Amino acid sequence: MAGPLQGLKIIEMAGIGPGPFAAMMLSDMGAEVIRVEAKASQAPIGFAHPRFDVTTRGRRSITVDLKHPDGTELLLKLLEQADALLEGFRPGVMERLGLGPEVCLARNPRLVFGRMTGWGQTGPLAKAAGHDLNYIAITGVLHAIGRADEPPPVPLNMIGDYGGGGMLLAFGMVCALLEAQRSGKGQVVDAAMTDGTALLSSIIVGMKAGGLWSNRRASNLLDGGTHFYDCYTCADGKAVALGALEPHFFKLFCEKVGLDGIDMSQHLSPKQWTALKPRIAALFRTKTRDEWCALLEGTDCCFAPVLDWDEAPEHPHNKARGTYVEIDGVVQPAPAPRFSRTPGEVQRPPAARGEHTDEVLADFGFAGADIDALRKTGVV
């Protein structure tokens, strides 16, 4: 086991989406994460084999019947030896199970209690159901994505679930764990996807306040409104991404592709954006994506091919950096970020439900007879 979080012990209440992603990040960085799963339940999204459930990698799995009174006590005993708990249920569920923060911190005052929800633990929407799309909708972020005069598209669930959700929870837990080392006291980390998504939009909110961003989609600097910051279709139907935001980068692009008659003093003029976009779109349709890559990739034109899921792991840059790894026959993103002295690593492939129950309980000090008794009573 390696990584900067080596030595930390975290209990993860099994869930979907951002919770497992946060737990994966912590495990990739060396923490020992024990995934607690219900004895008999079916995840909304099923996988043909656990190894494909990438965000559950790196952890050992145990099954516990938390509706059994002895199951609650079992988990509390595990928490006595843990540094943190991570859960992603609706507000009030852990309390109804007898595992709310007050109970858990009474058993272990140093415990960091991480809570992942869409709406947060408080507020008028706190107990309502929702998913990533709903959470990012009330932050202004969803409204800003897409083409003008069309409803916003449905983006992948990376903004709310993983960026504003799981990553913010992992960050918050590490912050609280650092503080607990100094104070000897744990606390609750309330991570809401609405809060995290709003935080991700900080630069856009600032630009809006400064008069540099409008509410109209595809009319701004970073939303596809310009000719120099957008995606274009090539002759073969594949796409490229041009991000020549600064004038000197766009000037180099013009020189490389033979685009003349451009008034660089009007680089930030919306009138020029409107006039030049069809011209550049027509230009990109004259060559295939590979031909444009041969001309522009690796230059200061701020250019890249738009790769699909199969192409991305094979790109020379990704291969050179080891951006993707293969675990148990499944190609997947490698741990990130990189550390010079304590690199993270995938500790093990995703586990089958309850695969490590006996092993984990033994590691936590339970005798063989005690484990047998827990099995006989149906607790595990």
Image (cartoon, rainbow, N blue to C red):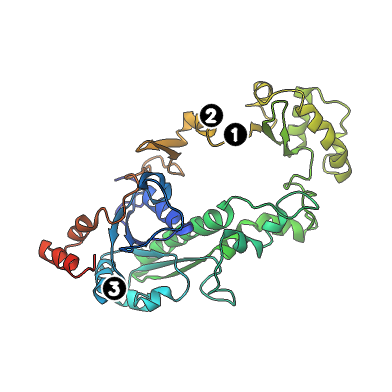
**Residue 12 location, quadrant:** bottom left
Position above or below: 254 against 52: above
The residue positioned farthest toward the left in the image shown:
369
Position above or below: 307 against 33: above
Are the residues tagged 1 and 3 within 8 Å (C-beta)? no
Placement of the C terminus among the 4 image quadrants: bottom left
User: From mark 2 to mark 1, how far is it between C-alphas?
Assistant: 9 Å
Q: Nearer the viewer, residue 121 or 131?
A: 131
Residue beneath label 1, please? 307
Helix, strand or loop at disc 1?
Answer: loop
Are the residues tagged 2 and 1 within 8 Å (C-beta)? yes
Residue at horizontal 73 percent and vertical 35 percent from the top = 232
Residue at horizontal 86 percent and vertical 31 percent from the top = 262
- From this viewpoint, is residue 187 visible? yes
Helix, strand or loop at disc 2?
Answer: loop
User: From mark 2 to mark 3, how far is it between C-alphas?
Assistant: 48 Å
Answer with left or right where residue 305 lies relative to residue 223. left
Which label is found at residue 127? Answer: none
Residue beneath label 3, please? 72
- From this viewpoint, is residue 10 visible? no
Disc on the earlier residue, 2 or 3? 3
Q: Of tags 2 and 3, which is closer to the observer?
A: 3
Position above or below: 376 against 288: below
| Rendering coords of residue 294 (x, y %) | 65, 21
Dot 3 surroundings within 10 Å: few (below 14), some, or many (20 or more)?
some
Answer with left or right where residue 308 lies relative to residue 217. left
| Rendering coords of residue 138 (x, y %) | 66, 65
Disc on the earlier residue, 1 or 3? 3
Amino acid marked by disc 1: Leu
Amino acid marked by disc 3: Thr
Amino acid marked by disc 2: His
Which label is found at residue 315? Answer: 2
